[in-house]
């Protein structure tokens, strides 16, 4: 039985988490196992911040943020009390030095710089996790994800070259597993066809696990989480969240599409294609039953699911010449959104107006407005919430839209969506 495990960075941020990861790996180490890790804690956000400070030439703030991030990693390594701490510290310090050199020589406005800088998080965490497991005598082999997952060079959101990836994985990974090694690799990062480092989109480590499972034809993927499983809503926001014992791939894809942050949206498609079940497992209670995601749709409507996306911007677009917002105008609008890499969360059109809702991002919003303003009249609202309810039981939507100003709403057989803002008292 071949398994692929993915441990998120929130779990590996301290000794307790790293120990727990090792104890879970220990339970399964007698069978072929691939372990995917993502950057520890909030490292990826911190790296994005370094990049933006470097681009703005804010040298003092950049130095401060750089040393803060380095300090966090050094403290984490020290807290592990490794026998050979010095070797690992030395490796991580070298990586930090390369990161600094990169930040000092950033090419202007290049997307590839993003991928190169941000990928350091996974390079650090991969080394730390592998080092720990090795010291604890696990037969672990750290294998660079850049040598396993091949993509195009669509930086920040690279697309996997499936055929080539499968070939490399058959050649490199399968033999390691046959030798009885546990393969540990980084999530989120890959390599483009010219060898440049690429990334698979924020929170893309789940997807990395799915790519590896697909190429290996694995028997299951387990995503370890600090929640009991896949929940019907975000337990940090809603106090009455419950665990979903079983959902279908389609239902989980829909949930991810609407913004449930538990599983990366692209993760499920490759698994569904070859029928690899995905389990969402409780990291600190591994003995409890996980959420099972597979082809069975029998439980999908059992429990209503709620997704709340904050920080939404609504842009309403109408033509200056009062022509209908039909195909020709929409073509212009969509190509502007695609050019600026803005993902549309909800859209609706009337005869003369087209409304689009997307995640707040002042820079991108300004850029898209700039490219549309000559042809269209634009109005926008910020700070909205997008509520999505699937399989409503007749109560949920009512409960959560109470005392809200509604900007837009949409409904189909399974899903209701409302763009709203709390009413000020
Ligand atoms: N470290 C990356 C991110 O935070 C990938 C991941 O966590 O899955 O976006
Ligand atoms: Mg992460």
Image (spheres, rainbow, N blue to C red):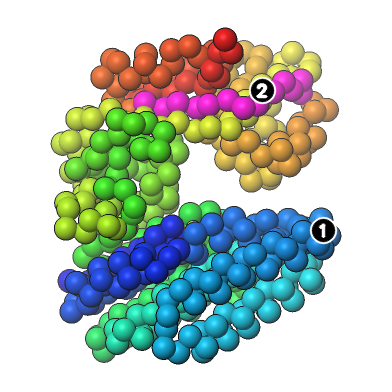
- Where is residue 271? Give x, y as percent: 30, 56
Q: In the picture shown, does residue 329 fall above or below 189? A: above
Q: Is residue 273 visible?
A: no
* Residue 276 position by quadrant: bottom left
Residue for point 41% across, 88% down:
83
Label 1 packing within 10 angstroms: few (<14), some (14-19), many (20+):
few
Quarter of the image with the N terminus in it:
bottom left
Label 2 packing within 10 angstroms: few (<14), some (14-19), many (20+)? few
What residue did someone put label 2 on? Answer: 381
What number is the disc on residue 58? 1
Q: Earlier in the sequence, mark 2 or mark 1?
A: 1
Between 264 and 404, which is closer to the camera in this rendering?
Answer: 404
Location of residue 105 (image quadrant): bottom right
| Chief SS of the magenta region | strand
Q: Is residue 371 magenta?
A: no
- Quadrant where the image shows the C terminus: top right
Residue 380 position, x and y percent, is 69, 23
Marks 2/1: CA–CA distance: 31 Å
* Range drawn in magenta: 376-389
Q: Quadrant of residue 155?
A: bottom right
* Secondary structure under the numbered disc 1 in the rendered image: loop
Q: Secondary structure at mark 2?
A: strand
Instruction: Please provide percent x and percent y for residue 308.
Output: 45, 31
Q: Is residue 198 left or right of residue 387?
A: right
Assess mark 1: CB under 8 A from ligand 1? no
Judge whether residue 382 is colored magenta: yes
């Amino acid at each position: 039985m071949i398994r692929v495990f993915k441990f998120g960075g929130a779990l590996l941020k301290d000794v307790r988490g790293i120990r727990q990861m090792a104890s879970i790996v220990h339970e399964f180490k007698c069978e072929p196992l691939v372990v995917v890790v993502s950057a520890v804690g909030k490292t990826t956000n911190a790296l994005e911040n370094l990049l933006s400070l470097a681009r703005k030439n804010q040298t003092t703030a950049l130095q401060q943020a750089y040393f803060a991030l380095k300090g966090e990693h050094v403290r984490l390594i020290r807290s592990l009390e490794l026998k050979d701490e010095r070797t690992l510290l030395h490796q991580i310090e070298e990586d930090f030095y390369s990161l600094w050199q990169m930040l000092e020589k950033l090419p202007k406005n290049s997307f590839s710089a993003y991928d190169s800088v941000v990928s350091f998080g996974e390079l650090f965490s991969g080394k730390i996790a592998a080092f720990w497991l090795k010291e604890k005598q696990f037969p672990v082999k750290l294998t660079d994800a850049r040598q396993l997952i091949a993509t195009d060079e669509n930086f920040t959101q690279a697309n996997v070259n499936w055929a080539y990836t499968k070939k490399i994985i058959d050649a490199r990974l399968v033999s390691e597993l046959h030798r009885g090694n546990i393969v540990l690799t980084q999530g989120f990062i890959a390599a483009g066809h010219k060898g440049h480092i690429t990334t698979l989109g924020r929170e893309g480590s789940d997807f990395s696990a799915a790519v590896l499972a697909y190429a290996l034809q694995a028997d299951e993927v387990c995503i370890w989480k600090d929640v009991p499983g896949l929940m019907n809503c975000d337990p940090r926001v809603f106090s009455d969240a419950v665990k979903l014992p079983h959902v279908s791939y389609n239902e989980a894809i829909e949930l991810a599409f609407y913004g449930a942050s538990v599983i990366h949206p692209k993760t499920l498609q490759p698994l569904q294609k070859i029928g690899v079940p995905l389990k969402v497992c409780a990291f600190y209670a591994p003995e409890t039953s996980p959420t099972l995601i597979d082809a069975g749709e029998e439980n999908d409507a059992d429990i209503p699911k709620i997704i709340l996306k904050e920080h939404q911007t609504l842009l309403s677009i109408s033509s200056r010449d009062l022509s209908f917002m039909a195909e020709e105008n929409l073509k212009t609008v969509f190509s502007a959104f695609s050019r600026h890499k803005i993902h549309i969360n909800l859209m609706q059109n009337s005869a003369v107006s087209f409304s689009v809702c997307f995640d707040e991002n002042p820079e991108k919003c300004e850029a898209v407005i700039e490219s549309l303003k000559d042809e269209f009249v634009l109005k926008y609202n910020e700070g909205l919430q997008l509520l999505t309810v699937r399989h409503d039981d007749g109560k949920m939507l009512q409960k959560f839209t109470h005392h809200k100003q509604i900007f837009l709403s949409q409904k189909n057989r399974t899903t209701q969506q409302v763009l709203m803002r709390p009413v000020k008292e």
